[in-house]
């Protein structure tokens, strides 16, 4: 089904929280310049699965994995993997927008500053501006770059978090229900943005909103109780699901 | 028995009124003397307080003159204390909140902190005498005193820093780590700046505490009478609390006004610190909401 | 851009910093261990010349007579009397005060009351001693018609005040931590607020109140300067609170300055320190037990 070189893949992946198995034997692949949606009822392991790819699950002491995760064919969990390098390549946007209590400018500059990769102020300014433009936020904030980020609206905060993630030029963008806490207008903006970003990034987005998945994604994976029930082209998943459970969920039986 | 039946005949509301009046009386009995104490200290101390008193050296067997070297000595001692205790305490707090796993070692450290907080201050004095003054040969000196006081205030700094660090939302850490920051970069650029007000509050409380303690410096740093400023950290110093003890109990025929004025300066210093800490806390709490 | 080099430097820096942070965690344990070790080491030399039984059971504390006698019973009794007196005064008043602040006082008054408690906590021990000398000591003398007011009673009264901040603030916290549903349930059954307080809230908060009492007790036993200034410091076994007496802490503070270093007297004072450390350690562990019990339930 997917025969181009994969950007990111998980092979026979199990994830445990202590004794509890949160993901069972999941295998799937993500392609460059495509949007992949992960859907399923809440608690089915979508966030857990997403956080495997940038190793954010390392923060949870009880979490343990078995199986393989590959980025450009390289084992993400290899001993010599530099986790900070990995996270620069694999950006993440969280469900609840989490800007730092700093200025808008400093939020976007944060990843660049800790990296020490910008030679001078002009270069930094340019990158901050570009990132904000990419996140479709520039026009709204260009006059108030030095205002505290927490004064922005919810939708603006989330786009700021996207800009912050884009600033360090990741190759992949993981988004965990980025619009779940937003109003319809902000949600629409984020969806447009995802469509734009797909030209340059590999995008994986978790959503519990099936219409959203159908609107924006090229591929869709359906999780249920930690199991990847079905994965394939979005059009096919939504029109002719192979599995009864997928069909049930999509037609609303699982809510 | 008789009393009881009488009571039970009263209506519950009357009982409540009497009981609440009793509680109010108890509270007044506890807290009014504090205000009274402050009023007396201020009333009697202020009259003896003067510019000369603050800037002159003690004269005439401490019966006249001022307390300049005493004030400066206290500042030096406390400065040294914070310089030692703050980095150590904040680092320990960082270890406990950001790195430590839930294991036996962590449990031991927490127990150690709780117990360190309960050790009597005179025992710190003994410890300082045994370790810093005698064994490490620092002598009765500012250094020994600061080191001893530093251990004394360590639990205050650690606990308040821990609270401050723990109150920084986990989402900030996640955001920073997801941007490829290392753990330390996350702590330094993201967690610590947000915890700073809480850490400052703890540090200021620690300063107040160190400035007011007598027993720990009794045999480690305090000089009975030293009419000039210390020349190095290996010299003993005069310190306000010890000085107050000395003039209150050891020297006969001292004017009461000098005693009151010294007590007032000490209390003003210590309470000034607490007040400052309360203001910082209040300011940032307001800001956070 | 020397990213390779930068990466290595970052890793090394990270490693060094993490180790340093870990070390400072260890230092805190080391301190408690060191304190105890030092007290033990210095006091053990005493027991070359005096037996433990003589030390703990001896009734005479004559450290500079010849031969010296190092019996701590008089000092222990002094500490016990003063502490007992202080707790008898502080417990009812402190708990009543905590209940009032937590449940009865109007909200705007509560903030001021709490501020006053914090004020009390910040006042240095010597200031309490000084104020005790000028107010409580003469008061005790005239009330009880004594030749001197420098007695255990004066010590107990000063210490009762010094115990208040610990007692009141921790007890108040634990009273306020009682879920409001309990209170609502009781009030809904027609109980008055006072009945609710006595039968529901205070019992529910009792482990926390017990912890508060224990912590205050630890503070009282370990208090030095104020006690030394007002109790009269007679090293004889007291038979009541209206006599001059001397506590363990005051003995160390008063005598260490005059001892010859590494003499038996010096060691004996360390032995008293070790005894104090043990007593407060036990009290702390007990109160810690109450606190963790509160957290669990
Ligand atoms: N930190 C954790 N510790 C233990 N169990 C967890 C943790 N995080 C999530 N889980 C469990 O793993 C399962 C999947 O959770 P999650 O990945 O958050 O689901 P989703 O994002 O699909 O709602 C849930 O049953 C949840 O209770
Ligand atoms: Mg989720």
Image: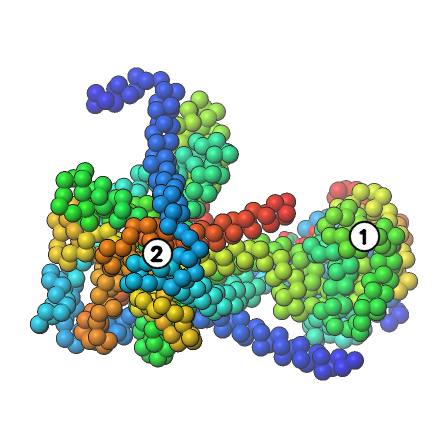
Helix, strand or loop status at disc 1: helix
Q: What quarter of the picture does the C terminus of chain B occupy?
A: top right
Residue underneath mark 1: A144
Q: Position of residue A81 (x, y in %)?
A: 70, 76
Disc 1: host chain = A
Helix, strand or loop status at disc 2: helix
Q: Does residue B7 appear left or right of residue A210 in this picture?
A: left
Q: Is residue C274 above or below residue B1?
A: below
Does the rendering let one see residue C288? no
Rendered residue at 30%/48% (across/down):
C131
Query: Whole-Å distance between the Cαs marked 2 and 1?
Result: 54 Å
Q: Which mark is residue C149?
A: none
Rendered residue at 11%/68% (across/down):
C69
Most foreground residue, B36 or B95: B36
Q: Position of residue C95 (x, y in %)?
A: 35, 39
**Residue B223 is drawn in which quadrant?**
bottom left
Most foreground residue, C271 or B209: B209
Q: Does residue C198 appear left or right of residue C138 in this picture?
A: right
**Residue A223 is drawn in which quadrant?**
bottom right
Q: Position of residue C107 (x, y in %)?
A: 50, 34
Q: Position of residue A230 (x, y in %)?
A: 79, 56
Does the rendering let one see residue B46? yes
Q: Are marks 2 and 1 on the same chain?
A: no
Most foreground residue, B6 or C92: C92
Q: Is residue B5 above or below residue C251?
A: above
Most foreground residue, B269 or A167: B269
Q: Does residue C74 appear left or right of residue B170 in this picture?
A: left
Q: Is residue C70 above or below residue A74?
A: above
Q: Which mark is residue C284?
A: 2
Disc 2: host chain = C
- Which residue sits furthest left? C66
* Image marks 2 and 1: residues in contact by CB distance under 8 Å: no
């Amino acid at each position: 089904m997917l025969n181009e070189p994969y950007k990111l893949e998980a092979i026979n992946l199990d994830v445990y929280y202590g004794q509890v198995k949160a993901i069972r034997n999941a295998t799937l692949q993500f392609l460059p310049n495509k949007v992949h949606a992960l859907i399923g009822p809440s608690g089915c392991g979508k966030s857990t699965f997403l956080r495997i790819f940038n190793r954010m699950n390392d923060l949870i002491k009880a979490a343990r994995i078995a199986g393989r995760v590959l980025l450009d064919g390289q084992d993400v969990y290899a001993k010599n993997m530099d986790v900070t390098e990995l996270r620069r390549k694999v950006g993440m946007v969280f469900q609840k927008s989490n800007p730092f209590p700093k200025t808008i400018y400093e939020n976007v500059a944060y990843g660049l500053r800790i990296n020490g990769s910008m030679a001078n102020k002009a270069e930094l300014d340019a990158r901050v501006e570009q990132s904000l433009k990419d996140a479709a936020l520039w026009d709204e904030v260009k006059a108030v770059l030095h205002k505290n980020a927490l004064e922005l609206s919810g939708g603006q905060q989330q786009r700021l978090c996207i800009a912050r993630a884009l600033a360090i030029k990741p190759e992949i963008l993981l988004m965990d229900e980025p619009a779940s806490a937003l109003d319809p207008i902000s949600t629409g903006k984020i969806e447009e943005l995802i469509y734009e970003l797909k030209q340059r990034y590999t995008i994986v987005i978790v959503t519990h909103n099936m219409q959203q998945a159908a609107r924006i994604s090229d591929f869709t994976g359906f999780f249920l109780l930690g199991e990847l029930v079905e994965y394939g082209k979005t059009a096919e998943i939504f029109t002719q699901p192979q599995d009864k459970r997928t069909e049930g969920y999509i037609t609303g039986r699982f809510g | 028995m008789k009393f009881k039946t009488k009571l039970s005949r009263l209506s519950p509301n009357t009982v409540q009124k009497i009981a609440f009046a009793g509680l109010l009386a108890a509270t007044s009995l506890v807290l009014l003397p504090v205000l009274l104490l402050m009023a007396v200290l201020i009333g009697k101390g202020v009259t003896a307080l003067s510019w000369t008193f603050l800037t002159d050296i003690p004269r005439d067997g401490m019966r006249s003159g001022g307390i300049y070297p005493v004030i400066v000595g206290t500042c030096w001692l406390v400065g040294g204390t914070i310089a030692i205790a703050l980095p150590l305490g904040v680092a320990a707090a960082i270890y406990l909140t950001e790195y430590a796993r839930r294991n036996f070692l962590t449990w031991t450290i927490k127990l150690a902190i709780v117990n360190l907080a309960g050790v009597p201050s005179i025992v710190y004095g003994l410890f300082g005498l045994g370790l810093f003054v005698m064994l490490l040969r620092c002598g009765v000196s500012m250094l020994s005193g600061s080191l001893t006081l530093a251990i004394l205030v360590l639990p205050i700094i650690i606990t308040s820093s821990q609270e401050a660090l723990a109150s920084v939302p986990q989402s900030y850490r996640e955001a920073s780590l997801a941007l490829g920051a290392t753990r330390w970069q996350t702590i330094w650029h993201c967690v610590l700046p947000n915890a700073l007000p809480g850490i400052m509050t703890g540090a200021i409380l620690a300063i107040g505490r160190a400035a007011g303690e007598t027993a720990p410096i009794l045999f480690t740093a305090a000089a009975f009478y030293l009419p000039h400023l210390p020349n190095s950290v290996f010299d003993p110093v005069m310190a306000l609390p010890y000085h107050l003890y000395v003039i209150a109990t050891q020297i006969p025929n001292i004017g009461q006004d000098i005693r009151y004025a010294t007590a007032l300066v000490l209390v003003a210093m210590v309470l000034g610190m607490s007040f400052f800490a309360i203001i910082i806390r209040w300011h940032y709490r307001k800001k956070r909401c | 851009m020397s990213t390779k080099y930068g990466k290595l430097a970052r890793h090394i820096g990270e490693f060094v910093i993490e180790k340093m942070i870990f070390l400072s965690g260890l230092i805190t344990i080391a301190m408690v261990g060191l304190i105890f070790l030092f007290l033990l080491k210095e006091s053990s030399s005493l027991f070359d010349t005096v037996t433990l039984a003589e030390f703990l059971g001896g009734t005479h504390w004559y450290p500079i007579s010849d031969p010296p006698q190092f019996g701590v019973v008089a000092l222990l009794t002094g500490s016990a009397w003063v502490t007992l007196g202080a707790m008898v005064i502080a417990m009812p008043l402190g708990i009543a005060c905590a209940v009032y602040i937590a449940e009865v006082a109007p909200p705007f008054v509560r903030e001021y009351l709490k501020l006053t408690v914090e004020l009390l906590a910040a006042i240095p021990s010597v200031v309490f001693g000084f104020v005790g000398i000028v107010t409580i000591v003469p008061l005790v003398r005239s009330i009880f018609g004594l030749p001197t007011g420098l007695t255990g009673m004066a010590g107990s009264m000063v210490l009762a005040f010094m115990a208040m901040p610990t007692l009141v603030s921790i007890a108040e916290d634990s009273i306020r931590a009682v879920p409001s549903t309990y209170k609502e349930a009781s009030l809904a059954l027609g109980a008055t607020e006072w009945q609710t307080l006595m039968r529901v809230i205070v019992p529910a908060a009792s482990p926390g109140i017990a912890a508060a009492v224990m912590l205050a007790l630890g503070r009282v036993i370990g208090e030095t300067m104020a006690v030394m200034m007002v109790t009269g410091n007679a090293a004889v076994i007291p038979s009541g609170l209206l006599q001059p007496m001397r506590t363990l802490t005051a003995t160390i503070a008063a005598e260490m300055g005059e001892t010859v270093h590494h003499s038996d007297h010096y060691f004996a004072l360390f032995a008293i320190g070790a005894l104090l450390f043990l007593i407060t350690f036990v009290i702390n562990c007990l109160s810690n037990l109450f606190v963790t019990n509160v957290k669990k339930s």
